[in-house]
Structure formats: C-alpha cells, structure tokens
Amino acid sequence: MSKKTLVIGASTNPTRYSNMATHKLLEHKHEVELLGKQSGEVAGHTIKQSTEELSADFHTVTLYINSERQIEYFDYLVALHPQRVIFNPGTENPSLKLLLEKNGIQTLEACTLVLLATGQF
C-alpha cells in the first residue's frame, strides 16, 4: 500500500540520507513530496521551499532536520495531521514528539531507510 510521504530536509546531495530515503521511497512505490532549504530536484521531484507549495494529505512525514530547525514546523505538522511522523537518527525532539502525540499523531524514532529495507514502513 502506497503511503504518501513528505520528506522534510530534502537535499539534492546523493550522500545525504534524505536523498537516499527519497529514492528508496520511490522504489517502494510511495508517492513523495519534498521540502528543503535549497531548490532542486531529486529523482524528478522538485524540492519545495515553502509549506504553502505542498499538498495536504500525507500519511507520513519523515524528518531530516535537527530539533532547532523543526521549531518553525510545529504548528504546520499539527495542522497537517499526518498519521505518523518519523524522527530519523539525529532529529529526535521530545517537545515535538509530545506535541504530536497529544494531537493524536503517531511518532517513531526510527530510520526510514531501515523501515523500508525491513518491510516495516
């Protein structure tokens, strides 16, 4: 089953985990949208630089930005109300985790690449 996924912290750099995850999500037939600081494309998908450019029906949000950079997305993520938010290694944020869970959004501290590779995504 395809799970539409928003990658926050998307990068055109092929050595970045957000880039690798985007490719793996697409290989596993998940629809993706990308949000990042720099414009560009990953696997034919444009990196948007504003949440206003994104659609609103995501199953999963996977984070690749540190806890300080996440602050500007707190309200957006609550309003977006995805089914789950994945905190990849290095993105853990107890404040955001608690806020999301209080609003009925599942959180996972996990690696998107591992979840995909093991069939747990």
Image: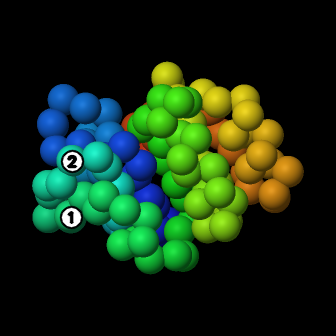
What is the distance, in whole Å, between disc 2 and disc 1 at their CAs?
13 Å
What amino acid type should be assigned to the residue bearing mark 2? Gln
Q: Residue at x 15, y 36 (%)?
A: 14
Residue furthest to the right in view is 102
Where disc 1 sits, the SS reads: strand
* Relative to 37, residue 69 above or below: above
Is 61 situated left or right of 53 in this image? right
- Give 71 or 5, whichever is nearer the viewer: 71
Where disc 2 sits, the SS reads: loop
Identify the residue under disc 1.
Answer: 45
Q: Quadrant of residue 71?
A: top right
Q: Position of residue 27 (x, y in %)?
A: 28, 56
What amino acid type should be assigned to the residue bearing mark 1? His
| Number of numbered labels in the structure image | 2
Is 83 situated left or right of 65 in this image? right
Marks 2 & 1, CB-CB < 8 Å contact: no
Is 79 situated left or right of 103 in this image? left
Identify the residue under disc 2.
Answer: 38
Residue furthest to the front in view is 72
Colour scheme in the image? rainbow
Is 54 situated left or right of 58 in this image? left
Q: Residue at x 14, y 64 (%)?
A: 44
Q: Position of residue 110 (x, y in %)?
A: 57, 33
Q: Residue at x 21, y 47 (%)?
A: 38
